[in-house]
Image (cartoon, rainbow, N blue to C red):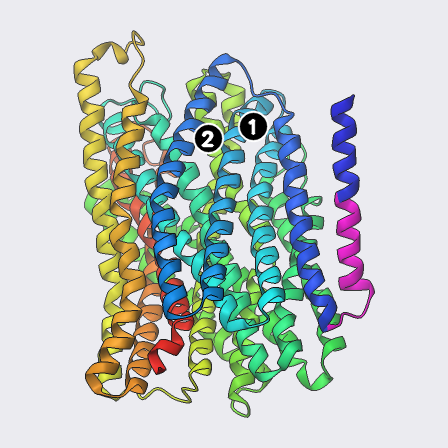
Amino acid sequence: METKKRQAFWEVLFWIVLLAGVYMSFGVYVTTVKSIFIGAIAGVTALLFAAIRTYKIMSKKNGNETMRTISHHIYTGAMAFLKREYKILSIFVIAVAILLGVFLSIETAICFLCGAICSALAGYIGMSVSTKANARTAHAAEKSLNKAFRVAFSGGVVMGMTVVGLGLLGLTILYWIFKDHEIVNGFALGASSIALFARVGGGIFTKAADVGADLVGKVEAGIPEDDHRNPAVIADNVGDNVGDVAGMGADLFESYVGSIIAAITLGAICLNLQGAFLPIVISGIGIFASIIAVYFVRTKENGSPMKALQIGTTVAMIMVIIASYFLIMNWFSKAYIGIFYALLIGIAAGTIIGYLTEYFTSYNYDPVKNIAKSTETGTATTVISGLDVGMLSTFFPMAIISIATIGAFLAIGGMESYSLGVYGISIAAVGMLSTVGMIVAVDAYGPISDNAGGIAQMANLSEVVRERTDKLDSVGNTTAAIGKGFAIGSAALTALALLCAYATVLDLENIDILNPFVTSGILFGAALPFLFCSLTMGAVGRAAGKMVNEVRRQFKEKPEIMTGGCQPDYKKCVDISTKAAILEMLLPGILAIGAPLIVGLGIGALAGEKIIGAQALGGMLMGAIATGVCLAIMMANTGGAWDNAKKYIEEGHFGGKGSTQHAASVVGDTIGDPFKDTSGPSLNILIKLMTIVSLVCATLFMG
């Protein structure tokens, strides 16, 4: 009874705060003064909502003793990795904060620390809840598909609301304190730094375990996926959380904060306080809309979870569009209706990219079915077919991003007013990310469902339960692919907005691409994503090799593992992935932060004119964004297509499990794992981190 009273108290408090925020946003004409409070109220509301959802999840039963034990192994493995990762990152963060304080300002260093802490905290909270929701989802699946779906989605909601809550609340408070967009840029730099290491480290961890588990367990030993006899199975399930929950959350946290800061910077220059505060209010409206839309995500026992998630996302977007129209019309004259059009363009672009990603990666459509068919002629044709689909899938999202960029630029002023035009690009990025709370919730739902399926398999639950968790997991595979596509699209627009902010702050009216220094910067920048991918792919290969050898060793030295006579040593495999991820994530991180400084300062000194160094750095960023986005889309979609081609075969098509076609598809999927979960997603953060480093350090390049 006491528990229900406490829950009722927090829910009443949440609704009071939510209605107060909605009233200020929708019911009262918003002024620039009130906008700061709307951002703060929206952030607090999101965190309260996340707390209430966490409480509800923890009140659910987590199954029998076996299920609790497996879930505990996953939780302790994930937390151990996060603890060791954050321990290393704390040294890095403190060192960078000191350098920022010495060369820029103490205020920028404080903002940097706050951004790093908020990003790390969002990852910790989200992953902690997701690793506790998995067994509860599996247990709920014993009763019904709908109950399992609600638990898994609630776990995703906690991650989504934590990301937007900490992001907007931290950014709003710091802007209110310092009242200087250049200082607050440090918040985005802190978020970007943590995001890169979280994405790279998490990606290396999860794919080392996944590749090791697949190559030895499924191909050599012939045991099913998520079989408790596989020594790497716990590491694989841990990896789902550190890569796809903490990693994806940090990625979109960075995009969310970066897009708002770019819009604040450009808006302050061309439209004063109203232009600077508009992205804060739009983001606050997005939080309220996402929370309300959560209540629209419902499904019946025989209903479609995917349709329910799509309805929730659509409701959130419609609410943002309607509310933003009245807000913009209230703040600006009809001459600035283009701001609304730019926002609309961003939302539309994100939606289209999501559908394109689904088309090229879902086995409901021809591209993936054609890859599955190619397995009939061997592994080589499987790989060729996958690369074919991945490369083709790159063209259409890039065309959408290009159209969106031009459309947003022309919507407000474009050729008549360059500063307003680039502000339109930043507003498009804010629009695309306005409902990121719902987007992250839908994406984080996937790993929880995947873990629930693994627990159901390892705990030998009934076939009905496994069928239900498989249905949830199949939807999770699609949402994960869409989430990656959305993350890449938002990264492209955010990086372009930050690049425009960098050029505007330094008064770079144009960058002469025929200048040899600038041309060299473009070529150098274009090569950086390939070097970055080499480092991350190589890291996965080395770590996976160690994992394969360890799993083989355990099967050889303890043959009774296969008969159930003894338990595998799960901790050893988790430790291998953890050590590899911590060690291998450092060099890519140094590359991302060091490259802009080397080019901006080095070429400026070499040319004897600092302005040349600043322009060369602009060229480097353009080259990196162009190739980075293309490479990220190609790798993410290729890996997703290979993965779902394998799943299509496992459902009984083209020979089914155990056939030569299945063996070929497993090889394709294994190659695609680091494509879609390590290198591809990490490129998002590479291009954003380099642009935010350039923006924060802009004054250094010009003295």
Q: Residue furthest toward the bottom? A: 416
Residue 313, percent from left and from top: 62, 52
Q: Residue furthest toward the top? A: 565
Q: Alpha-carbon distance for marks 1 and 2? A: 9 Å
Q: Which of 80 and 117 is in front in this view?
A: 117
Answer above or below: position of 360 versus 301. below
Q: Which residue is drawn at 29% across and 30% down?
A: 575
Left or right, 330 with respect to 608, comes to right
Q: Which residue is drawn at 63% across and 75% down?
A: 341
Q: Which residue is drawn at 74% across and 32% down?
A: 7
Q: How crowded is mark 2: few (under 14 residues within 10 Å), some or many (20 or more)?
A: many
Provide the residue span drawn in magenta: 14-31
Compare marks 1 and 2 and give the one earlier in the sequence. Answer: 1
Residue 8, percent from left and from top: 78, 33
- The answer, for residue 652, to whether it is visible in the render is no
Left or right, 468 with respect to 548, comes to right
The majority secondary structure of the magenta stretch comes to helix
Q: Which residue, given by chain and number where applicable, does mark 2 sit on?
A: 451
Q: What residue type is labelled 2?
A: Asn
Q: Nearer the viewer, residue 510 or 614?
A: 614
For residue 137, the mark is 1
Answer above or below: position of 291 versus 215. below
Q: Residue furthest toward the right? A: 27
Q: Does the magenta segment cover residue 68?
A: no
Q: Do the residues labelled 1 and 2 touch (CB within 8 Å)?
A: yes
Left or right, 473 with respect to 44, comes to left
Q: Which amino acid does label 1 sit on?
A: Thr
